[in-house]
């Protein structure tokens, strides 16, 4: 069973023991990301994530830091999203103190060396190029731009080549000391947690508050959803396949209907037996990949279906997706289909949470989101869910719940379509965006 507690310096600690494992993961989650950035600093959260691996006062170069991490035989990585940033180490449990020493050193003592920043600009720009050249990955960014426009919620997490190239060391120092606070940060330990580990966390992260208490935190802008007509965003690109994302505004994290929404998305396109996978790929041969998913931010969310389809068949694919959206509004899910999807979720959770890094992320993301919603006084989950509690919530969802949610979100004016491909005729697609 996991435990959540506040340390003396205001840092939230989550411990999640796992029986039978020989590993432990130490994950730092901070409740800040690209939605907290000023326009001229778009991408700095993601860039900062890279800079944590570029040397500290104790481990002054990338090579020294990475060599020590490698010497543990463990795994390590980091990630940045719209509302959070995380970095972690997974090691043999006998290396727990080493992992805590390194991760805390990265958080508290990174140098943000000017020369390293200049070098890393080229790396980030190539990462931006990589995503732009991969429509299957980039379509989500285009969709969010369609959904949220020219706002922090609609801009790419990686930033632009223009913003990235202008960052200075002072920008990093100011953003880091302002946004990285104990009160919006979580340490999650998952795995083989030995006695005395909590005291070690307190020891290594003791200086966190003192380093960040005087700089103001910049809160993110709240998303105001007031869409009055369907929206379209075309990213013109000469491709051999058309990529699309068709979806609607939905619910924020912790919304009372978030479980019904999750089940709805899986029924539509969350597995190889899902409705859209069968209809688009197996029956019509229109696509190779088809997926429907949901995203829940602290104050907003959406459901979208993504697919890569034949150039000349994109209109047909859009019509098929809309037809399935309409169908699930009108017809109750049959008991066997609903049970199959619930069983799928249960099985995926069991498989997913076999390793300590996945368990750490399960609890760390929830805890960071809970802090974000508490800070902004946004209605959300009042607690972090264990896998067992999550499954209980899933089991309570009925067919009527799913139909009610479908009728709530699948409204004509609520439609958003993003397309990547060699298209310029907006009217062609706008005519299709209706039920």
Image (cartoon, rainbow, N blue to C red):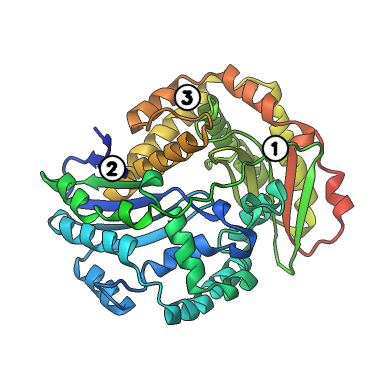
Quadrant location of the N terminus in the rendered image: top left
Residue drawn at x 53%, y 39% is: 298
Residue wearing tag 2: 13
Q: Position of residue 159 (x, y in %)?
A: 59, 64
Badge 2: residue crowd in 10 Å (few <14, some 14–19, many ≥20): many
Q: Are marks 3 and 2 in contact (CB under 8 Å)?
A: no
Instruction: Give the foreground label among 1 and 3.
Output: 1
Q: Which is nearer the N-term, disc 2 or disc 1?
A: 2
Residue 34 position in % (x across, y down): 55, 55
Q: Which residue is drawn at 26% across and 52% down?
A: 25
Counting every numbered tag in the picture gives: 3
Report which quarter residue 264 is drawn in: top right
Kindly report the distance in space between the C-alpha atoms of the residues bearing marks 2 and 1: 34 Å
Mark in the foreground, 3 or 2: 2
CB-based contact (under 8 Å), mark 2 and mark 1: no
Residue on which disc 3 sits: 339
Q: Is mark 2 on a helix, strand or loop?
A: strand
Report, in whole angstroms, how far the alpha carbon at label 3 lies from the one at label 2.
36 Å
What element does badge 1 sit on? loop
Give the class, few, some or many, for how many residues have Cα within 10 Å of label 1's Cα (few <14, many ≥20).
some
193 to the left or right of 325: left
The residue that label 1 is drawn on is: 225
Q: Along the horizontal axis of the image, is 13 left or right of 118?
A: left
Looking at the picture, tell me which residue is in the foreground, 119 or 429.
Answer: 119
Residue 328 visible, this angle: no
- Image quadrant occupied by the C terminus: top right
Q: Quadrant of residue 212?
A: bottom left
Is residue 372 in sight in this rendering?
Answer: yes
Image vertical order of residue 168 relative to residue 4, above or below: below
Of the numbered discs 3 and 2, the one sitting upstream in the chain is 2
318 over 243 or under it: above or below? above
Residue 33 - label: none
């Amino acid at each position: 069973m996991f435990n959540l507690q506040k340390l003396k310096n205001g840092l939230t600690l989550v411990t999640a023991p796992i029986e039978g494992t020989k590993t432990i993961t130490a994950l730092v989650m901070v409740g800040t990301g690209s939605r907290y950035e000023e326009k001229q600093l778009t991408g700095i959260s993601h860039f900062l994530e890279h800079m944590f691996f570029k040397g500290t006062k104790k481990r002054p170069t990338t090579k020294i830091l990475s060599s020590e991490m490698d010497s543990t035989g463990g795994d390590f990585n980091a990630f940045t999203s719209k509302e959070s940033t995380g970095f972690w180490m997974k090691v043999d449990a006998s290396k727990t103190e080493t992992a805590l020493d390194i991760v805390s050193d990265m958080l508290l003592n990174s140098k943000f060396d000017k020369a390293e920043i200049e070098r890393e600009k080229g790396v980030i720009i190539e990462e931006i190029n990589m995503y732009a050249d991969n429509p299957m990955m980039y379509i989500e960014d285009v969709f969010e731009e369609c959904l949220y426009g020219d706002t922090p919620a609609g801009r790419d997490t990686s930033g632009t080549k223009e913003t990235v190239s202008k960052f200075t060391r002072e920008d990093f120092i100011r953003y880091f000391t302002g946004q990285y606070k104990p009160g919006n940060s979580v340490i999650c330990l998952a795995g083989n947690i030995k006695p005395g580990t909590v005291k070690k966390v307190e020891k290594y992260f003791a200086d966190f508050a003192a380093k960040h208490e005087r700089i103001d935190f910049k809160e993110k802008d709240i998303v105001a959803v007031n869409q009055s007509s369907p929206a379209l965003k075309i990213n013109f690109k000469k491709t051999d396949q058309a990529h699309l994302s068709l979806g609607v505004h939905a619910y924020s994290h912790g919304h009372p209907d978030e479980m019904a929404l999750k089940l709805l998305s899986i029924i539509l396109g969350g597995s190889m037996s899902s409705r859209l996978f069968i209809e688009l790929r197996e029956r019509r041969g229109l696509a190779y990949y088809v997926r429907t998913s949901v995203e829940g931010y602290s104050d907003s969310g959406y459901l979208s279906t993504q697919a890569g389809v034949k150039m000349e068949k994109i209109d047909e694919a859009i019509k098929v997706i809309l037809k399935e959206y309409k169908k699930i509004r009108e017809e109750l899910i049959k008991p066997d289909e609903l049970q199959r999807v619930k069983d799928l979720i249960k099985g995926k959770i069991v498989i997913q949470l076999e390793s300590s890094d996945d368990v750490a992320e399960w609890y760390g993301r929830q805890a960071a989101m809970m802090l974000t919603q508490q800070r902004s006084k946004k209605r959300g989950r009042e607690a972090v869910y264990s896998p067992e509690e999550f499954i209980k919530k899933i089991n309570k969802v009925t067919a009527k719940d799913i139909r009610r949610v479908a009728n709530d979100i699948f409204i004509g004016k609520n439609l958003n379509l993003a397309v990547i491909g060699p298209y310029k005729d907006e009217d062609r697609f706008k005519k299709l965006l209706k039920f």
